[in-house]
């Protein structure tokens, strides 16, 4: 081989290496882009997706005014377990115990899962195999907030659906109504959410109902002389005792009586009057940082609404599957 031929060969090798390097960078860039949620994700592939999902919610609200609270809670419970991947929607197969079977999820109405199913039917009829169940749940949570008077916010989409759902993971990952402030802060920190976002997202308790068994220990099992948690307003405690006459009563009461169907700052105003229903609610007054935020939101509804919208978008990014991960389920209750 001549010197000229050797030089040309080296140049060819270098050019090939450069091309391979550039191709790798392009693929990496594509992968990074694919792994980002974005507003308008279905603008080209299914432009009516959000409208069709909202239609299913509106139809359900005509027969059950409180169903939106369950859908909001379901999105939260989905995101805190394996990320926002729709795993809470899966039914048990071959005897396995899935997330929806966990005790902490038993109070979510079956009808809420039916709403997701109907929304999926709506979009599949127009755009088969395009819209994920995880995105449908995120849209439904947003539309529920807006229906009850909260701020409408843009939902970044592009989630794909997970294939694994394990009951015990709900128990170990979700906060309970008996958590103290430190436990709440750590639980949310584990999911990449700040203490401020924890206080903000707690405001979801302004809508919906709770079962008596979730809080009766505050009414009958306290070390105080009356048996009532001393951090609970006595008048409110008396009202709750009438609705929940025993430790095991399984009735439902509004989590925020002045605002059961209104997404507003009434929840925080109630906490300031010692009317937080759960231990976790009232514990927000036990530290200066959280008490200050409760006071701010109680005074300024717009501050709460804007903060809640931002916190929901951030929560909706927890552990998402995008790009080539996961799948787009044909039916939300079963993997493909």
Image (cartoon, helix red, strand yellow):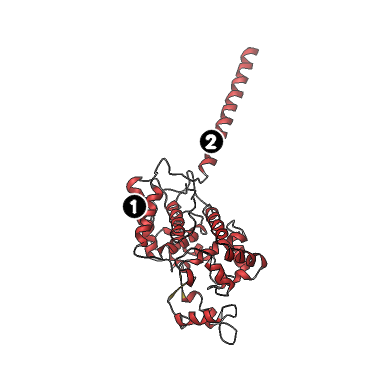
Say left or right for 268 vs 118.
right
Q: Residues within 10 Å of mark 1 (few under 14, many from 20)?
A: some
* Residue 255: image location, x then y, percent: 49, 71
**Residue 160, horizontal then vertical, whole percent:** 46, 49
Quarter occupied by residue 293: bottom right
Q: Which residue shows up at 55% across the image and 56% down it?
A: 306
Which of the labelled discs sits on residue 291, or is there none? none
Residue 110 lies left or right of residue 19; in this view the side is: left
- The circle drawn on residue 27 is 2
Vertical arrangement, residue 19 with respect to residue 313, above or below: above
SS of the residue at dot 1? helix
Return the residue found at the far right.
288
Give the Cα separation between the discs numbered 1 and 2: 34 Å
Which quadrant, please, contains the N terminus? Answer: top right
Quarter of image, res 67: bottom left
Percent across and percent down for residue 45 are 40, 41
- Element type where label 2 sits in the image: helix
Q: Indicate the position of residue 22 as horizontal and vertical percent values.
A: 57, 30
Of marks 1 and 2, the one in the foreground:
1
Q: Nearer the viewer, residue 12 or 18?
A: 18
Residue ID at (56%, 79%): 233
Say whether residue 1 is visible. no
List the residue tagged with mark 1. 121
Q: For residue 29, say whether it is visible.
A: yes
């Amino acid at each position: 081989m001549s010197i000229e031929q050797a030089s040309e060969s080296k140049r060819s090798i270098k050019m090939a290496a450069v091309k391979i390097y550039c191709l790798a960078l392009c693929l990496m860039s594509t992968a990074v882009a694919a792994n980002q949620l974005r507003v308008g994700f279905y603008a080209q592939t299914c432009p009516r997706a959000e409208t069709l999902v909202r239609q299913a919610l509106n139809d359900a609200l005509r027969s059950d005014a409180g169903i939106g609270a369950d859908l909001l809670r379901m999105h939260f419970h989905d995101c805190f377990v394996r990320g926002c991947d729709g795993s809470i929607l899966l039914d048990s197969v071959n005897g396995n115990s899935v997330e929806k079977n966990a005790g902490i999820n038993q109070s979510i109405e079956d009808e809420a899962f039916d709403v997701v199913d109907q929304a999926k039917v709506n979009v599949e009829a127009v755009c088969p195999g395009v819209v994920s169940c995880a995105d449908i749940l995120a849209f439904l949570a947003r539309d529920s907030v807006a229906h009850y008077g909260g701020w409408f916010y843009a939902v970044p989409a592009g989630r794909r659906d997970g294939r694994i759902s394990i009951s015990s993971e709900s128990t170990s990952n979700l906060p309970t109504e008996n958590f103290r402030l430190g436990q709440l802060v750590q639980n949310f920190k584990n999911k990449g959410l700040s203490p401020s976002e924890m206080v903000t997202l707690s405001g979801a308790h302004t809508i919906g109902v709770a079962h008596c068994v979730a809080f009766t220990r505050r009414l009958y099992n306290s070390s105080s002389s009356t048996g009532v948690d001393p951090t609970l307003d006595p008048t409110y405690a008396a009202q709750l005792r009438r609705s929940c006459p025993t430790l095991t009563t399984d009735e439902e009461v509004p989590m925020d009586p002045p605002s059961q169907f209104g997404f507003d700052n009434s929840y925080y105003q109630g906490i300031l009057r010692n009317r937080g229903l759960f231990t976790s609610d009232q514990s927000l007054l036990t530290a200066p940082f959280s008490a200050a935020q409760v006071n701010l939101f109680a005074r300024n509804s717009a501050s709460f609404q804007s903060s809640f919208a931002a916190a929901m978008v951030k929560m909706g990014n927890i552990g998402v599957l995008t790009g080539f991960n996961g799948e787009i389920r044909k039916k939300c209750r079963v993997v493909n």
